[in-house]
Image (cartoon, grey):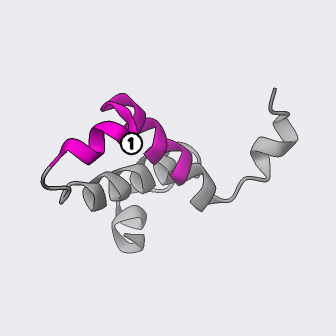
């Protein structure tokens, strides 16, 4: 089990990675990705993961998120 202190010490990049990997899991996992011919949507998924983390975890405004991304 992850302790609360460990969650607090996770960097924004690590939080985004967790969200990104969860999204990949939800679309069928890494093996399923191998079957897609075009993976042009992966950068958009990464940006969306950043937006979610910055909004929900760091309470950034939409404008702040847009500037950062």
Q: From this viewpoint, is residue 59 visible? A: no
Can you name the residue that lies furthest to the left here? Answer: 37
The range drawn in magenta is: 17-36
The one of 54 and 2 positioned closer to us in this rendering? 2
Against 15, is 66 above or below? below
Q: From this viewpoint, is residue 8 visible? A: yes
- Give percent across and percent down for residue 1: 81, 26
- Give percent across and percent down for residue 33: 28, 44
- Crowding at mark 1 (Cα within 10 Å: few <14, some 14-19, many 20+): few
Against 24, is 49 above or below? below
**Residue holding disc 1:** 30
The one of 46 and 66 positioned closer to us in this rendering? 46
Residue 44 covered by magenta stretch: no
Residue plotted at (35% across, 39% down): 31
Residue 6 position by quadrant: top right
Residue plotted at (18% across, 60% down): 40
Residue 33 covered by magenta stretch: yes
Residue 42 position by quadrant: bottom left
* Secondary element type, mark 1: helix
Type of secondary structure dominating the magenta stretch: helix
- Give percent across and percent down for residue 46: 37, 56
Q: In which quadrant is the C terminus drawn?
A: bottom left
Left or right? Give the position of 27 relative to 37: right
Residue plotted at (50% across, 54% down): 54
Residue plotted at (38% across, 35% down): 29
């Amino acid at each position: 089990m992850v302790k609360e202190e460990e969650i607090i010490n996770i960097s924004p990049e690590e939080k985004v990675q967790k969200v990104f990997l969860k999204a990949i899991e939800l679309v069928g996992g890494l093996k399923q990705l191998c079957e897609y011919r075009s993976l042009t949507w992966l950068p958009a998924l990464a940006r969306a993961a950043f937006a979610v983390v910055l909004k929900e975890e760091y309470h950034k405004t939409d404008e702040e998120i847009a500037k950062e991304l």
